[in-house]
Amino acid sequence: MSILEITLFCALPALALALILTPLVIRLSKAVNLMDAPGPRKIHSTPIPRLGGLAIAAATLIPFVATIIWKHELLLASHINTAAILTLISTATAVLILGLIDDMVNVPAKLKLMVLVAAAAALCASCGGGISDITFKGSSVLKFGNWSWLVTIVFINGIAVSINFIDGLDGLAAGISIAAFAVLAVGAASGGQILIFLLAVCMIFALVGFLVFNFHPAKVFMGDCGSLFIGFVLAGSCVLVTQRVGTTRGIILPSLAMSIPLLDTALTMVRRSVLHRQSLFTAERGHIHHRLLDTGLIHRHAVLILYAVTFTAACVALVTYFGDPLATALTAGGFILALSILFRVSGSVRAQETLQAFRRNRAMHRQRKRYQTIFDELRVAFREQETFEGWWDCLCRGAEKLDIAKLELPVTRRNGSSVNLTWKSEDGEVIRADAISAEVPVRHRRQGDPLRLEVEVPASNCLESAGYRVALLSQLMNEFSLARLPVSSDRDGGGGSKLTHTPLSKTEPSGLASGQSPELVARSVIR
């Protein structure tokens, strides 16, 4: 039986199964109410079934496994050990189940990452190692040595996550994946890796059949089960091909075809961690496809533009492998320019804003450490206080160090009269700065409500800094309230003794910090 006949034996059943199983999965999703509901981040306006990944996986694996059983001699001809192929199938199935559970009950992102890492490690173990080096045109460019497993696990997870991230428009992830598997199939075929070639063919035709129902307006989504399964199979296949034919055909070419989702994933990580200071797994609406829609493009046009760029990337990958150095340089340079323009025009690349945010975050981190050090010193100082005067003096000195502008504490004497103890910073810049006002409760031993310490904190163009300082002061008042002072000190707070305090000179300018004020009560006024 010729290779063409074996290929058709895989491709046609994969296409037929996808066309048959996808409508069944749609009915199943509706029957068990596993629908993707509309939301602020979603493009669709009506609930859509989201278990399409089950149809893709079944349409891919059934013909592939049937071919291996029918033509078991292919295992010997592929130069890939049986354990590696079986591990790829089993780990991809485990990832599919993980995605299915996530589609049903929302698995925590860290748990999903742990499972993906474990699956990638199992695949590395089965094939005797990971990506050992990067080669181009037969020459080794970079060797990883002992880091090969880590590089391989990061690569597999990066591909899986990028497919998951790019699955935001109807038909987008499926179309891009088809291009990536097509390039992988060419590389595997040219290197004699028949099994990986057949697996890529099965996936291509399964995706084509699924795309009939997934293209805009979509009747079904692939869901996390589909995107994670596709990404893991693609990355795992690349690793297995690399073991035999090197990283040019196994890693570089498919990665070029995946340039849009990979670049989008990298920019997403930077945007979430630097600009927004969020978790890397926090959902938001800033991907390249969202940006294109924000420019005014309609849904179908945005998808077609990304298809065109992906097709160009696939062509560049093939030229890189089969073409001469001059053609490779010209096509690669043109593609990089076009890709840069696309991401720049869409607003996905914000280099200047990212640099400013990075500098701001570093400054905030330094100031936070400084304030935390001051807080630790104040805790030691407050433990030594035994009188009200000492407590108030320590509080004022601490306020000076924490760049607080004003303190005011209404105190009631034993004879019933009241006095407002007031402290102000001598730093005119601090006093003139925009500030927030807050009230912090201070417990005492007498009956009645706690005292209310009024605090004025300069915002320094950053409310987070002021909030963090109020939080530190609140924690001090919670740990070292008047109720902790010895009983004899009540005479000091209630007898109307005169209190004086000389503000300390600051050695560092007011800066930035981040945080919240858990002890802040009553009010917070920006002025």
Image (cartoon, rainbow, N blue to C red):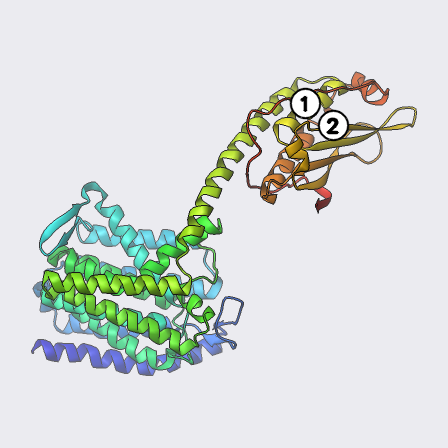
Q: Position of residue 242 (x, y in %)?
A: 16, 57
Q: Position of residue 52 (x, y in %)?
A: 38, 74
Q: Residue 468 or 525: which is nearer the viewer?
A: 525
Query: Is residue 446 positioned above or below 191 on the image?
Result: above
Crowding at dot 2, Cα within 10 Å, few <14 / some 14-19 / many 20+, comes out as many
Residue 343 in the figure: left or right of residue 388: left
- Identify residue for label 1: 503
Circle number at residue 423: 2
Kind of element beneath mark 2: strand
In the picture, the quarter occupied by the N terminus is: bottom left
In the picture, the quarter occupied by the C terminus is: top right
> Residue placed at 55% from the left, 36% from the top?
511
Residue 86 shows in the view: no
Residue 428 in the figure: left or right of residue 115: right
Q: Position of residue 456 (x, y in %)?
A: 70, 37
Q: Residue 522 or 77: which is nearer the viewer?
A: 522
Dot 2 amino acid type: Trp
Query: Is residue 379 positioned above or below 514 on the image?
Result: above
Question: Tag 2 or tag 1, which sits nearer the N-term?
Answer: 2
Q: CA distance from mark 1 to mark 2?
A: 9 Å
Query: Is residue 137 positioned above or below 436 on the image?
Result: below
Kind of element beneath mark 1: loop
Q: Quadrant of residue 244?
A: bottom left
Kindly indicate whether the residue at mark 2 contacts the one at mark 1 (C-beta within 8 angstroms): yes
> Residue placed at 29% from the left, 78% from the top?
208
Dot 1 amino acid type: Pro
Residue 263 in the figure: left or right of residue 330: right
Q: Quadrant of residue 229?
A: bottom left
Q: Position of residue 300 (x, y in %)?
A: 39, 78
Circle number at residue 417: none
